[in-house]
Amino acid sequence: MNAALEVSGTKLDDFLDWVEILRAQNFHTEDLETEQQFLAYLVLRGVWHLLNNAYQGDGRGFLTVEQTRGLQEVDAQIAELERQLPPGAVTEVRSCIARLLRLVDEHEHSD
Amino acid sequence: MKSFVPQAIMEHLDSLNQSLADQQSFGIIGLDVQAIVRIFNKAEERLSGLPASEVLNRSFFDEVAPCTASRLFRGRFRAGLERGSLDEHFFYTFTYRIRPVSAHIHMLYRPAQSPLVFLFVDRVIPLFEDLG
Protein backbone atom coordinates (compact mmCIF):
# COMPACT_ATOMS: atom_id res chain seq x y z
CA MET A 1 0.00 0.00 0.00
CA ASN A 2 1.33 3.41 -0.98
CA ALA A 3 2.06 5.37 2.18
CA ALA A 4 0.57 8.46 0.53
CA LEU A 5 -2.80 6.73 0.57
CA GLU A 6 -2.79 6.45 4.33
CA VAL A 7 -5.39 8.99 5.36
CA SER A 8 -5.23 10.23 8.88
CA GLY A 9 -8.15 8.83 10.85
CA THR A 10 -8.32 12.08 12.74
CA LYS A 11 -8.88 14.14 9.59
CA LEU A 12 -11.53 11.77 8.32
CA ASP A 13 -13.20 11.93 11.71
CA ASP A 14 -13.03 15.74 11.55
CA PHE A 15 -14.72 15.71 8.16
CA LEU A 16 -17.47 13.39 9.36
CA ASP A 17 -17.97 15.45 12.51
CA TRP A 18 -18.23 18.54 10.37
CA VAL A 19 -20.92 16.97 8.18
CA GLU A 20 -22.75 15.80 11.30
CA ILE A 21 -22.71 19.31 12.80
CA LEU A 22 -24.02 20.81 9.56
CA ARG A 23 -26.78 18.23 9.41
CA ALA A 24 -27.71 18.82 13.05
CA GLN A 25 -28.08 22.51 12.28
CA ASN A 26 -30.12 21.79 9.16
CA PHE A 27 -27.24 23.29 7.19
CA HIS A 28 -28.23 26.76 8.35
CA THR A 29 -31.17 26.77 5.99
CA GLU A 30 -34.91 26.69 6.35
CA ASP A 31 -37.17 24.39 4.34
CA LEU A 32 -34.26 22.84 2.55
CA GLU A 33 -33.57 19.97 4.87
CA THR A 34 -34.45 17.15 2.48
CA GLU A 35 -32.52 18.70 -0.36
CA GLN A 36 -29.49 19.21 1.87
CA GLN A 37 -29.76 15.66 3.25
CA PHE A 38 -29.89 14.39 -0.30
CA LEU A 39 -26.75 16.32 -1.26
CA ALA A 40 -24.95 15.16 1.87
CA TYR A 41 -25.91 11.60 0.94
CA LEU A 42 -24.50 12.04 -2.56
CA VAL A 43 -21.24 13.45 -1.19
CA LEU A 44 -20.80 10.75 1.44
CA ARG A 45 -21.47 7.98 -1.07
CA GLY A 46 -18.82 9.53 -3.30
CA VAL A 47 -16.40 9.74 -0.38
CA TRP A 48 -17.02 6.09 0.46
CA HIS A 49 -16.21 4.97 -3.10
CA LEU A 50 -13.21 7.28 -3.27
CA LEU A 51 -11.72 5.88 -0.06
CA ASN A 52 -12.63 2.29 -0.91
CA ASN A 53 -10.91 2.56 -4.28
CA ALA A 54 -7.84 4.12 -2.70
CA TYR A 55 -7.60 1.59 0.10
CA GLN A 56 -8.30 -1.53 -1.94
CA GLY A 57 -5.59 -0.42 -4.37
CA ASP A 58 -4.51 -3.06 -6.84
CA GLY A 59 -5.80 -5.96 -4.78
CA ARG A 60 -2.45 -7.12 -3.45
CA GLY A 61 -3.27 -6.61 0.19
CA PHE A 62 -6.00 -6.25 2.75
CA LEU A 63 -7.30 -3.10 4.34
CA THR A 64 -5.85 -2.04 7.66
CA VAL A 65 -7.90 -1.70 10.83
CA GLU A 66 -7.84 2.09 10.52
CA GLN A 67 -8.95 2.00 6.87
CA THR A 68 -11.75 -0.42 7.66
CA ARG A 69 -12.91 1.67 10.59
CA GLY A 70 -12.90 4.80 8.41
CA LEU A 71 -15.08 3.18 5.75
CA GLN A 72 -17.48 1.93 8.39
CA GLU A 73 -17.78 5.39 9.90
CA VAL A 74 -18.64 6.90 6.52
CA ASP A 75 -21.08 4.06 5.89
CA ALA A 76 -22.75 4.63 9.25
CA GLN A 77 -23.57 8.20 8.23
CA ILE A 78 -24.75 7.00 4.82
CA ALA A 79 -27.05 4.47 6.51
CA GLU A 80 -28.46 7.13 8.80
CA LEU A 81 -29.27 9.38 5.85
CA GLU A 82 -30.86 6.44 4.03
CA ARG A 83 -33.30 6.07 6.91
CA GLN A 84 -34.37 9.69 6.50
CA LEU A 85 -34.47 10.09 2.73
CA PRO A 86 -37.25 8.88 0.42
CA PRO A 87 -36.39 5.33 -0.73
CA GLY A 88 -36.64 6.41 -4.35
CA ALA A 89 -33.92 9.01 -3.86
CA VAL A 90 -31.62 6.45 -2.24
CA THR A 91 -32.09 3.99 -5.09
CA GLU A 92 -31.55 6.70 -7.66
CA VAL A 93 -28.27 7.89 -6.12
CA ARG A 94 -26.93 4.36 -5.83
CA SER A 95 -27.73 3.50 -9.42
CA CYS A 96 -26.51 6.89 -10.62
CA ILE A 97 -23.09 6.44 -9.00
CA ALA A 98 -22.84 2.88 -10.28
CA ARG A 99 -23.76 4.06 -13.77
CA LEU A 100 -21.24 6.90 -13.70
CA LEU A 101 -18.43 4.65 -12.47
CA ARG A 102 -19.23 2.19 -15.25
CA LEU A 103 -19.27 4.96 -17.85
CA VAL A 104 -15.92 6.31 -16.68
CA ASP A 105 -14.38 2.86 -16.73
CA GLU A 106 -15.75 2.06 -20.20
CA HIS A 107 -14.81 5.47 -21.59
CA GLU A 108 -11.27 5.18 -20.27
CA HIS A 109 -10.82 1.88 -22.08
CA SER A 110 -12.72 2.58 -25.27
CA ASP A 111 -9.76 4.11 -27.14
CA MET B 1 -1.13 -16.87 -6.33
CA LYS B 2 -2.32 -20.41 -5.75
CA SER B 3 -6.01 -21.01 -6.34
CA PHE B 4 -8.22 -22.61 -3.70
CA VAL B 5 -10.49 -23.92 -6.46
CA PRO B 6 -10.07 -27.65 -7.21
CA GLN B 7 -8.60 -28.39 -10.63
CA ALA B 8 -11.57 -30.64 -11.40
CA ILE B 9 -13.85 -27.61 -11.22
CA MET B 10 -11.58 -25.23 -13.12
CA GLU B 11 -11.16 -27.70 -15.95
CA HIS B 12 -14.87 -28.47 -16.25
CA LEU B 13 -16.59 -25.14 -15.92
CA ASP B 14 -19.20 -26.40 -18.36
CA SER B 15 -20.57 -28.69 -15.67
CA LEU B 16 -20.45 -26.13 -12.87
CA ASN B 17 -24.14 -25.58 -12.21
CA GLN B 18 -26.03 -24.45 -9.10
CA SER B 19 -26.19 -27.99 -7.73
CA LEU B 20 -22.45 -28.66 -8.03
CA ALA B 21 -21.66 -25.17 -6.74
CA ASP B 22 -23.78 -25.81 -3.65
CA GLN B 23 -21.54 -28.74 -2.75
CA GLN B 24 -18.44 -26.55 -2.46
CA SER B 25 -17.19 -25.01 0.77
CA PHE B 26 -16.11 -21.70 -0.80
CA GLY B 27 -18.23 -19.01 -2.39
CA ILE B 28 -19.19 -19.33 -6.06
CA ILE B 29 -20.97 -16.61 -8.01
CA GLY B 30 -21.70 -17.10 -11.69
CA LEU B 31 -22.37 -13.98 -13.75
CA ASP B 32 -23.49 -13.74 -17.33
CA VAL B 33 -21.79 -11.22 -19.61
CA GLN B 34 -24.26 -8.54 -18.49
CA ALA B 35 -23.14 -9.20 -14.89
CA ILE B 36 -26.51 -10.67 -13.96
CA VAL B 37 -26.20 -13.27 -11.19
CA ARG B 38 -27.02 -16.75 -12.52
CA ILE B 39 -25.37 -18.92 -9.84
CA PHE B 40 -25.05 -18.07 -6.16
CA ASN B 41 -24.05 -21.04 -4.07
CA LYS B 42 -24.95 -21.96 -0.51
CA ALA B 43 -21.49 -21.18 0.87
CA GLU B 44 -21.72 -17.67 -0.56
CA GLU B 45 -25.20 -17.29 0.91
CA ARG B 46 -23.83 -18.23 4.33
CA LEU B 47 -20.71 -16.07 4.09
CA SER B 48 -22.39 -12.98 2.68
CA GLY B 49 -25.65 -13.29 4.58
CA LEU B 50 -27.55 -12.77 1.33
CA PRO B 51 -30.19 -15.36 0.38
CA ALA B 52 -29.90 -16.58 -3.21
CA SER B 53 -33.55 -15.68 -3.78
CA GLU B 54 -32.67 -12.00 -3.33
CA VAL B 55 -29.62 -12.15 -5.55
CA LEU B 56 -30.34 -14.39 -8.53
CA ASN B 57 -31.25 -12.59 -11.76
CA ARG B 58 -30.12 -9.24 -10.41
CA SER B 59 -27.23 -7.04 -11.50
CA PHE B 60 -24.21 -7.93 -9.39
CA PHE B 61 -22.38 -4.61 -9.57
CA ASP B 62 -25.39 -2.30 -9.54
CA GLU B 63 -27.78 -4.06 -7.17
CA VAL B 64 -26.23 -6.96 -5.30
CA ALA B 65 -22.79 -5.63 -4.38
CA PRO B 66 -22.58 -1.93 -5.26
CA CYS B 67 -19.42 -1.71 -3.16
CA THR B 68 -17.68 -3.67 -5.93
CA ALA B 69 -18.59 -1.15 -8.65
CA SER B 70 -14.94 -0.15 -8.84
CA ARG B 71 -12.20 -0.66 -11.36
CA LEU B 72 -10.56 -3.23 -9.13
CA PHE B 73 -13.60 -5.45 -9.31
CA ARG B 74 -15.83 -4.49 -12.23
CA GLY B 75 -12.86 -3.20 -14.23
CA ARG B 76 -11.35 -6.68 -14.17
CA PHE B 77 -14.69 -8.17 -15.20
CA ARG B 78 -14.97 -5.75 -18.14
CA ALA B 79 -11.36 -6.24 -19.22
CA GLY B 80 -11.78 -10.00 -19.10
CA LEU B 81 -14.83 -9.88 -21.32
CA GLU B 82 -12.99 -7.65 -23.79
CA ARG B 83 -10.02 -10.03 -23.89
CA GLY B 84 -12.26 -13.08 -24.13
CA SER B 85 -10.66 -14.73 -21.12
CA LEU B 86 -10.06 -14.04 -17.47
CA ASP B 87 -8.00 -15.82 -14.85
CA GLU B 88 -7.08 -13.37 -12.13
CA HIS B 89 -6.57 -13.40 -8.40
CA PHE B 90 -6.77 -10.48 -6.03
CA PHE B 91 -7.57 -9.64 -2.43
CA TYR B 92 -10.59 -7.62 -1.43
CA THR B 93 -11.80 -6.46 1.96
CA PHE B 94 -15.56 -6.26 2.21
CA THR B 95 -16.73 -3.64 4.68
CA TYR B 96 -20.06 -2.50 3.29
CA ARG B 97 -22.98 -3.29 5.61
CA ILE B 98 -21.42 -6.54 6.80
CA ARG B 99 -18.91 -7.64 9.40
CA PRO B 100 -15.58 -6.76 7.77
CA VAL B 101 -14.00 -9.69 6.05
CA SER B 102 -11.07 -10.08 3.70
CA ALA B 103 -11.27 -12.46 0.83
CA HIS B 104 -9.19 -14.03 -1.88
CA ILE B 105 -11.08 -13.57 -5.14
CA HIS B 106 -10.42 -15.72 -8.19
CA MET B 107 -12.17 -14.48 -11.35
CA LEU B 108 -12.34 -17.05 -14.09
CA TYR B 109 -13.85 -16.75 -17.56
CA ARG B 110 -13.26 -19.43 -20.18
CA PRO B 111 -15.96 -18.95 -22.81
CA ALA B 112 -14.98 -22.17 -24.57
CA GLN B 113 -16.11 -23.98 -21.42
CA SER B 114 -18.89 -21.79 -20.06
CA PRO B 115 -20.62 -18.54 -20.99
CA LEU B 116 -20.51 -17.48 -17.33
CA VAL B 117 -17.86 -15.44 -15.55
CA PHE B 118 -17.16 -17.14 -12.24
CA LEU B 119 -16.20 -15.37 -9.05
CA PHE B 120 -14.69 -17.83 -6.60
CA VAL B 121 -14.57 -16.32 -3.14
CA ASP B 122 -12.48 -17.65 -0.29
CA ARG B 123 -12.99 -15.77 2.95
CA VAL B 124 -9.53 -15.51 4.36
CA ILE B 125 -9.85 -13.74 7.65
CA PRO B 126 -12.86 -12.64 9.65
CA LEU B 127 -11.31 -9.29 10.40
CA PHE B 128 -11.27 -7.15 13.45
CA GLU B 129 -13.89 -8.69 15.65
CA ASP B 130 -14.04 -5.49 17.65
CA LEU B 131 -15.20 -3.57 14.59
CA GLY B 132 -18.19 -5.78 13.79
Image (spheres, helix red, strand yellow):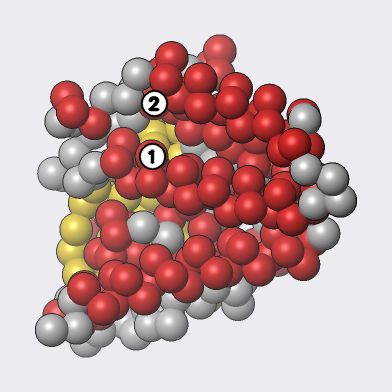
Above or below A102: residue B122: above
Q: Are marks 2 and 1 in contact (CB under 8 Å)?
A: yes
In terms of depth relative to the viewer, which is nearer, B114 or B56? B56
On the question of residue B45 being in view, the answer is: no
Please report the residue visible at 74 percent of the width from the left and 55 percent of the height from the top. A35
Q: Which residue is tagged 2?
A: A67
The disc numbered 1 marks a residue on which chain? A
Viewer-nearest of discs 2 and 1: 1
Q: Name the kind of residue labelled 1 in the image.
A: Leu
Q: Earlier in the sequence, mark 2 or mark 1?
A: 1
Answer with the quarter of the image where residue B83 lies. Answer: bottom left
Q: Which residue is tagged 1?
A: A51
Q: Name the kind of residue labelled 2 in the image.
A: Gln
The disc numbered 2 marks a residue on which chain? A
Please report the residue visible at 43 percent of the width from the left and 82 percent of the height from the top. B34
Q: Position of residue B42 (x, y in %)?
A: 58, 54
